[in-house]
Image (cartoon, grey):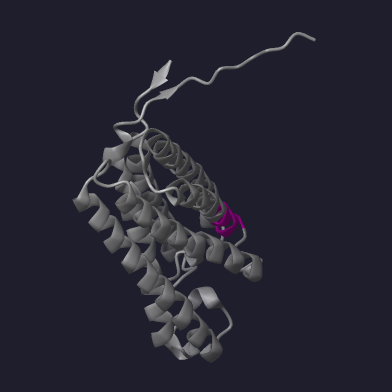
Amino acid sequence: MVFKHSYVVPIILVIWFPLTFIITYTLSVVNENVKPLFPYISDTGSWSPESCIFGILLTTGAIFMWIIIYVRYRQVRELCEKNDFKSYTHKLNKISLYLACIASYGLIVVANFQVTNVLVVHLIGAGMCFGLGTLYQILQVVISFLIYPTFGKKSINIFRAFCTVICIITLTLTSGFALVSILQFTGDDLTKWGKEDGGYDFHLVSTIAEWILAIFTQFFLVTYTEEFKLVEFSEPTIIAKLA
């Protein structure tokens, strides 16, 4: 059996994550668990019942990400084996695979270790997810230009690079302003951060940057759609040995 529809997975992903965030944001605001104006994405999944939905949907999204990451890795590996690309292209591809797998696992950590329960573990997961995820994007942009014009389109590569630059900038803003704001925080509940709690303006810059970071990460992954239309997977061969 040949599977020819791997291009559908990036499309599913770019619908799945926004839908997840809309659901958890709506529930958390209605239940008055967060402030309506740009909470951190994780804050919308910190309290029950939205935390349950946040956990299962983000974990499922991470599985979709693993599929995308693996298909892209195999696609580039196949191209490297059949074409005379620079020797380090395959090495970069393998490194990007490892980084992205760890980043996706970080997303699962973020989903299941809430800010309100295990803050340190949650922050480690967020660093894995966004930090290593951005490094993955950088490597894939380099790879995209290395295999062009044999494979890919210049316009897609440029858009990929644009998304990556935005992610680098917003990751820096999110991290930097989060640190500054937390040092000025005087409230009792991080998930209900208001103007009266100190450092609010810095907090708002950080949260807005995080939402932009998440959006452009999805834009980056959906750029694989066109290239995945050229991918076919055959059913794996299973050898059952007799005892």
- The residue located at (29%, 32%) in the rendering is 229
Is the N terminus in the top left, top right, bottom left or bottom right quadrant? top left
Q: Is residue 44 left or right of residue 218?
A: right
Residue 44, given in percent of the width and then of the height, sits at 47, 63
Residue 238 locus on image (x, y percent): 60, 17
Q: Is residue 47 above or below residue 238?
A: below
Q: Nearer the viewer, residue 62 or 90?
A: 90
Question: Which residue corresponds to the image point at 54% horizontal and 64% vertical from the top-left?
Answer: 126
Please tell me which residue is depicted at 58% across the width and 68% down the height of the picture.
Answer: 123
Left or right of residue 67: residue 243: right
The verdict on residue 238 being magenta is: no
Query: Most extreme residue toward the top, as rendered?
Result: 242
Magenta span contains residue 106: yes
Whether residue 206 is visible, yes or no, is yes
**Which residue does the image show at 40% across and 69% down from the upper left?**
210
Classified by dominant secondary structure, the portion drawn in magenta counts as helix
Q: Quadrant of the C terminus?
A: top right
Please provide percent x and percent y for residue 227. Answer: 29, 39
Residue placed most toward the observer, 146 or 166: 146
Above or below residue 136? Residue 16 is above
Front one among 182 and 220: 220
| Looking at the image, residue 220 lies above or below residue 6 | below
Q: Residue furthest left?
A: 155
* 229 sits to left or right of 58: left
Identify the magenta region: 105-112
